Amino acid sequence: DAKTTQPPSMDCAEGRAANLPCNHSTISGNEYVYWYRQIHSQGPQYIIHGLKNNETNEMASLIITEDRKSSTLILPHATLRDTAVYYCIVRGPLYYNQGGKLIFGQGTELSVKP
Amino acid sequence: EAGVTQFPSHSVIEKGQTVTLRCDPISGHDNLYWYRRVMGKEIKFLLHFVKESKQDESGMPNNRFLAERTGGTYSTLKVQPAELEDSGVYFCASSQEGTLYYEQYFGPGTRLTVT
């Protein structure tokens, strides 16, 4: 079972920041938080991951709380093409306790509206 | 650099028939994963190859599913005989070996319909 909980859906206005929350209260010390998204009819796409520090890349920012029990994915200027299902996934190291696989939950369906 | 490719993109077969799905990972990626999404459900892990060896096959639903990765390059997933509940989208993903924390690159998926 997924170790994360996310709201099932969210709306965001085009050009505004989209803030997608995720709860992972049972995360272990060596587990990372990963975010993927799936745009309709495509395969899942990696966005970002982090352990405890905030992370930023060209796609998004990841804010992880100090106790690591929750995180927020931020798309700073959402576009219509960001409409997708966003998955927050907690995952261990590759060779630790079968840590390679991704366990997907239901995710958050983000709709970016004009 | 070419991404993960899957063939075919769509397959429609009758119950009881056999279907073979193919995945070509990104060149140089030793880790290869199979996932699937059946109607209305989450994406579920099926199995994980490291080169030609099965590292984790805990997600394989039953013995009608057979995955191979001869030579550690492309992989095939055979369903024999197919059942109605096997309908869904089958995804393949690959990643580099040797890194603890890394991203998986997914293919576009094969949509399987069993009638």
Image (cartoon, coloured by chain):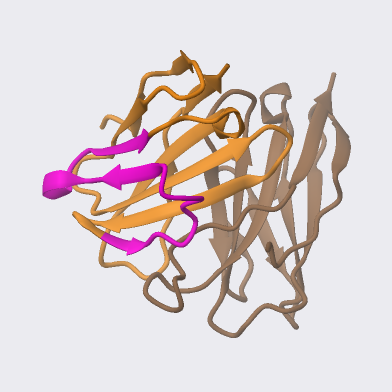
Chain colours: A brown, B orange
**A88 on left or right of B93:** right
- Outermost residue toward the left? B71
Q: How many numbered marks, from 0 up?
A: 0
Compared to A23, does B105 lie above or below? above
Residue at point 23%, 54% (across, down): B30
Where residue A9 appears, as percent x and y from the top left, is 86, 40
Compared to A34, does A13 lie above or below? above
**A92 on left or right of A1:** left
Residue at point 37%, 56% (across, down): B48
What span is colored magenta in the figure?
A: B54-79
Compared to B14, does A95 lie above or below? below
Where residue B95 appears, as percent x and y from the top left, is 34, 52
Residue A78's image quarter? Answer: top right
**B78 on left or right of A36:** left
Note whether residue B46 is visible: yes
**Nearer to the camera, A51 or B64:** B64
Note whether residue A57 is visible: no
Compared to A25, does B59 lie above or below? above
Residue at point 18%, 43% (across, down): B73
Q: The N terminus of chain B lies in which quarter of the figure?
A: top left
Residue B34 lies in the magenta stretch:
no
**Nearer to the camera, B45 or B64:** B64
Where residue A90 appears, as percent x and y from the top left, is 61, 66
